[in-house]
C-alpha cells in the first residue's frame, strides 16, 4: 500500500521591523489513502484512475449497515478536512473485485453537508425539557469537545445548558441532533450540567457534519477480463459525498469542463 501526499498551505506570521507579515509555506502532510496496482488489488470497491486504484474511506461513520432508506441518524463527520476521502473525478471508474461472488446490485448512498459544529450529534430533548447527550457515541472522538468533555464525563448523561451564554433551544438543533449556526474554527463556551454540578468549557467548532439524503440502486455493470467489474454510475450525480455499498466514501466534485 502506497501513501498519497497532500500539500497544505499554512499561513505563518513573522515579525519584522515594520510589523507582522504573512508568509505562505507549503507543508507536505502524509495522508493514508490506500493505493494499489492491478497486481496488488485486494477484493472490494475502488476508484480506478488510470492504472491506479484508490480505496474509499470507511471511517468517520455513525452506522455500520447498508441503508433501507435515507435517515438523519446516518451521519458522516470529519475533523480532518476529509483528507483521507479520495476524489472520484471525470474519467475515473468505480470498480468491484471479488474472486468468488458478484452482487446483483450495489447501493449508492448520497450525503449532504448539514453544518460545521462542535463534535456532538444526537442531542435530544428529555421529559424535563432539557437538551441532553446520552452516550459517548454521540460525541466525535477526534473532536476538541470530546477531549474537553472527557475530563469530566465517563458514562454520565450530559445536560447541555448554553452556548456562549445563549440557552440551548430547538432553533439551534438540526435534524442530526447537532448544533447549527457555528463557524468552523471558532471557539465557543459550552455550559453543561453533570447531575446538579454546572461546568463550562472552551471548545472549537472543528467538525463537518453530513447526513444521508438519497439512496440509489445500481444494477448495471460491465465485466472485464482484468479480474474486476466496472459499475455504471448514475449520469446525473450531484456534487457531494457518496458511500458505495457501505464499503467506503468517495468525494464527487461534479463535472469539470475540460
Image (tube, grey):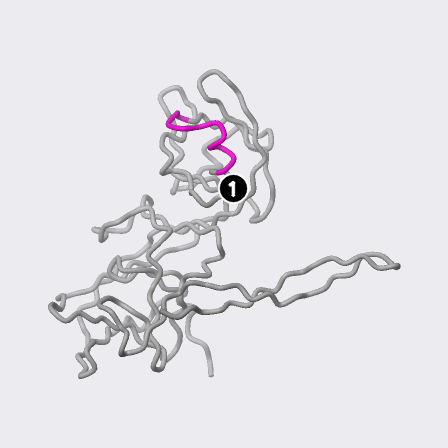
- In the rendered image of this protein, does residue 155 appear above or below residue 215? above
Callout 1 secondary element: helix
Identified at 50% across, 44% down, the residue is: 117
Q: Provide the residue span drawn in magenta.
A: 147-157
**Residue that lies at the very extreme toward the top in this rendered image:** 196
Residue 195 in picture, x, y percent from top left = 44, 18
Residue 149 in picture, x, y percent from top left = 49, 32
Residue placed most toward the observer, 151 or 182? 151
Verify whether residue 143 appears in magenta. Answer: no
> Toward which corner of the image does residue 203 lie, by quadrant?
top right
Residue placed most toward the observer, 253 or 103? 103
Verify whether residue 156 appears in magenta. Answer: yes
Are there few (<14), some (14-19), or many (20+) residues within 10 Å of tag 1? Answer: some
Q: Main secondary structure of the magenta part?
A: loop
Q: Quadrant of the N terminus?
A: bottom left
Identified at 42% across, 75% down, the residue is: 255
Horizontal arrangement in the rendering, residue 102 relative to residue 120 (left or right): left
- In the rendered image of this protein, does residue 83 appear above or below residue 147? below
- In the rendered image of this protein, does residue 138 appear above or below residue 115? above
Residue placed most toward the observer, 28 or 137? 28
Residue 71 in picture, x, y percent from top left = 29, 47
Residue 21 in picture, x, y percent from top left = 78, 61
- In the rendered image of this protein, does residue 169 appear above or below residue 186? above
Horizontal arrangement in the rendering, residue 255 relative to residue 16 (left or right): left
Residue that numbered label 1 is attached to: 144
Identified at 49% across, 64% down, the residue is: 30
Identified at 27% across, 78% down, the residue is: 39
How many discs appear? 1
Horizontal arrangement in the rendering, residue 247 relative to residue 144 (left or right): left
Amino acid at each position: 500500500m502506497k501513501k498519497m501526499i497532500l500539500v497544505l498551505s499554512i499561513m505563518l506570521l513573522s515579525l519584522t521591523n515594520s510589523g507582522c507579515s504573512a508568509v505562505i509555506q507549503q507543508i507536505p502532510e502524509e495522508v493514508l489513502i490506500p493505493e494499489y496496482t492491478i497486481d496488488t488489488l485486494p477484493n472490494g470497491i475502488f476508484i480506478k484512475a488510470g492504472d491506479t486504484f484508490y480505496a474509499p474511506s470507511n471511517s468517520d461513520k455513525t452506522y455500520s449497515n447498508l441503508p433501507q432508506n435515507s435517515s438523519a441518524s446516518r451521519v458522516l463527520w470529519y475533523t480532518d478536512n476529509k483528507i483521507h476521502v479520495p476524489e472520484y473525478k471525470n474519467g475515473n471508474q468505480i470498480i468491484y473485485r471479488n474472486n468468488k461472488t458478484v452482487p446483483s446490485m450495489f447501493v449508492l448512498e448520497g450525503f449532504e453537508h448539514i453544518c460545521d459544529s462542535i463534535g456532538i450529534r444526537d442531542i435530544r430533548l428529555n421529559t424535563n425539557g432539557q437538551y441532553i447527550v446520552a452516550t459517548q457515541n454521540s460525541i466525535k472522538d477526534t473532536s476538541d469537545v470530546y477531549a474537553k468533555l472527557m475530563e469530566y464525563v465517563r458514562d454520565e448523561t450530559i445536560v447541555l445548558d448554553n452556548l456562549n451564554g445563549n440557552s440551548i433551544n430547538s432553533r439551534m438543533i438540526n435534524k442530526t441532533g447537532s448544533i447549527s449556526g457555528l463557524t468552523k474554527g471558532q471557539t465557543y463556551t459550552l455550559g453543561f450540567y453533570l447531575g446538579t454540578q454546572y461546568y463550562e468549557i472552551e471548545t472549537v467548532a472543528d467538525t463537518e457534519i453530513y447526513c444521508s439524503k438519497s439512496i440509489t440502486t445500481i444494477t448495471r455493470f460491465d465485466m472485464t477480463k482484468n479480474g474486476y467489474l466496472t459499475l455504471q454510475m448514475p449520469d446525473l450525480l450531484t456534487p457531494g459525498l457518496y458511500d458505495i455499498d457501505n464499503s467506503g466514501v468517495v468525494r464527487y466534485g461534479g463535472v469539470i469542463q475540460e
